[in-house]
Image (cartoon, rainbow, N blue to C red):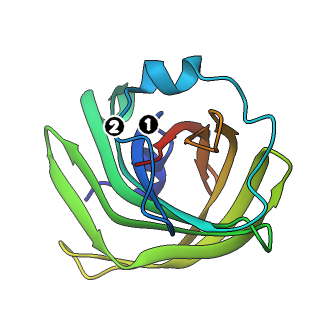
Amino acid sequence: MLPFGKYAALTAVLAMSACTSSGGGSGSLSAAQVRALPVTATMPTSGKATYKGKTSQTDYEPSLGGNLTLTSDVRLDANFATNQIDGTVSNIKAKAAQGSVAYDGSLRGTGNIYGSQFDVRTTGVLTSRNTGNTIYTGADIDGTFKGTNADAIDGSVTFVGSPTTSLIAIKQ
């Protein structure tokens, strides 16, 4: 079995899309395009936006003698009127030469928007589809809104007890 802690430590890039309550947005942007956007100077003071995306990163893991790939889905729901943001990390999977592990369950939490930055602390229970083992864990999601109208997010996801992973979120 591949332990959660081992693969959660990998660096992951999260490409995300967002829908605003008004139905507008920026469509798809690459990670490089998001990183090139300026920090949002004037944040929206009303409305909501939903950011969705997937993480995917492959790194060499010495304890496994080969590459390990981490993937997951992430959703962020921003409420600009209340300066609150909800986050969910789900569909977490790890794949290595020895096999793969998929988890049922999700990590959920609520955080705050501070100017053009935000943070969300998630917790939850994940159950291995392979063994039925249960894992109690969490992830911190931190970032900066980018673009003229908070069109994207550039930030990080850190699984509890693991190094930081990178986060890119794009508004539709």
Give me the disc on residue 12: 1
The residue type indicated by label 2 comes to Ser
Q: Nearer the viewer, residue 47 or 63?
A: 47
Q: Which residue in the protein does label 2 denote?
A: 28
Residue 95 position in % (x across, y down): 21, 46
Q: Nearer the viewer, residue 156 or 9?
A: 156
Secondary structure beneath label 2: loop
Residue at (65, 35) in percent of width and height: 148
Secondary structure beneath label 1: loop
**14 lies above or below 90:** above
Q: Which of 13 and 127 is in front in this view?
A: 13
Q: How crowded is mark 1: few (under 14 residues within 10 Å), some or many (20 or more)?
A: many
**36 lies above or below 66:** above
**Mark 2–mark 1 CB contact (< 8 Å):** no
**147 lies above or below 106:** above
Give me the disc on residue 170: none
**Nearer mark to the viewer, of 2 and 1:** 2
Residue at (79, 61) in percent of width and height: 45
Q: Is residue 136 visible?
A: no
Residue 31 position in % (x across, y down): 43, 26
